[in-house]
Structure formats: C-alpha cells, structure tokens
Amino acid sequence: MTKVTYLTEDGLRKLREDLETLVNIERPKISKLIGEAIEKGDISENAEYDAAKDAQGLLEAKIAHLQSKIASARIIDESKIDTSQVQILNKVTIKNRKSNATMVYMIVPESEANLKESKISVNTPIAKGLMGKKVGDLVDIKVPSGVIEFEIIDISL
C-alpha cells in the first residue's frame, strides 16, 4: 500500500523539478561516464566503471523514490485552511512560558520542512503538540530536553 504524501503546490513543483534534473541531466552524465569507462578496456578490473555503475544505481533509486512520492502526492487545498485552530500550513506564534522567548513556525508536510525558514514538519513533537489548539491555549510539549510549556500567541496563514 502506498503512503499518501501531502504537499503544497509549491512542494510538488519542487519535487517535479528535482525529478526532471535527475532524469534529464544527471542520468545522461552517468551514462556518459559508464561509456567512457567501457572504452578504456577490461571492465572486470575497472574502478571507474564500478564507481559509475554504483552512482547509476543510487541515481535510479533516487528517481524511483521521487516518482513514487509524486505519484502518491495529494495537494493540500490552501483555501480551506482556517486559523481558528492550529493545523497544517498555519504560521503559529508561540511563547516559551519559562524563558519568554517568542518563536514563529509554519507547520508543513514533512518533505517541505526547513528549520532555516522556520518551517517545521507536522510530525515534530512541537507541531504535534500544537495541532488543534487555539490562540491563548497553554500547551506542554515534550522535547528532548524535557517538557516545555508554550502559549499560543497567534495563528495565521
């Protein structure tokens, strides 16, 4: 059974671009390397040939993985997202009740997570703890360093 992957339109576009690059640029490069290695003679003891074949195997695995992800992708309808409670694709402003530090995270599908952009996966402990909560709610979230109490300050798109 194929696992459904939820993505934004932007996330799906990026996956398709990555796949196109692998198929149209990387695959021909590796084929060329294999051809050049074969031209050098005996392939049974040819390290260049072995390396190129290994690279080809890894590339084909990446291509198959992306194709599978794209085939099982479901687009999240951003127009149906509301901000009355925390859900995927919301920007959530939270305040650490102990340190008074304020953070803003966008909750995204796992494949689109990027901490540098403050995008956290829906599968992280923080996101799981926030899901379904409303502005003003206090939430205790278990993180590797212990339990932290957060207050939800704002929910937006």
Image: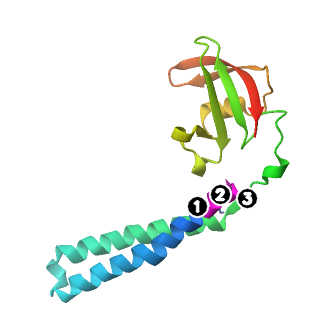
Q: Are marks 2 and 3 in contact (CB under 8 Å)?
A: no
Q: List the residue tagged with mark 2.
A: 10
- Disc 1 secondary structure class: helix
- Disc 3 secondary structure class: strand
Where is residue 10? Give x, y as percent. 65, 57
- Disc 2 secondary structure class: helix
Which segment did they paint magenta?
3-13
N-term mark: 2 or 3: 2
- Which residue type carries mark 3? Ile
Local packing at callout 1 (Cα closer than 10 Å; few below 14, some 14-19, many 20+) is: few
Q: Nearer the viewer, residue 66 or 16?
A: 16
Q: Nearer the viewer, residue 149 or 144?
A: 149
Location of residue 126 by image quarter? top right
Q: Is residue 107 above or below residue 72?
A: above
Query: Looking at the image, which residue is at 81% across and 33% down?
Result: 85
Query: Looking at the image, which residue is at 82% across and 36% down?
Result: 83
Q: Is residue 67 above or below residue 103?
A: below
Q: Disc number at residue 14? A: 1
Query: Looking at the image, which residue is at 20% across and 74% down?
Result: 48
Q: List the residue tagged with mark 3.
A: 75
**Front: mark 1 or 3:** 1
Q: Are marks 2 and 1 in contact (CB under 8 Å)?
A: yes
Is residue 51 visible in this depiction of the protein? yes
Location of residue 142 by image quarter? top right
Residue 94 is one of the magenta-drawn residues: no
N-term mark: 1 or 3: 1
In this rendering, position of residue 78 left or right of residue 114: right
Where is residue 113? Give x, y as percent. 57, 45
Q: CA distance from mark 1 to mark 3?
A: 13 Å
- Which residue type carries mark 2? Asp
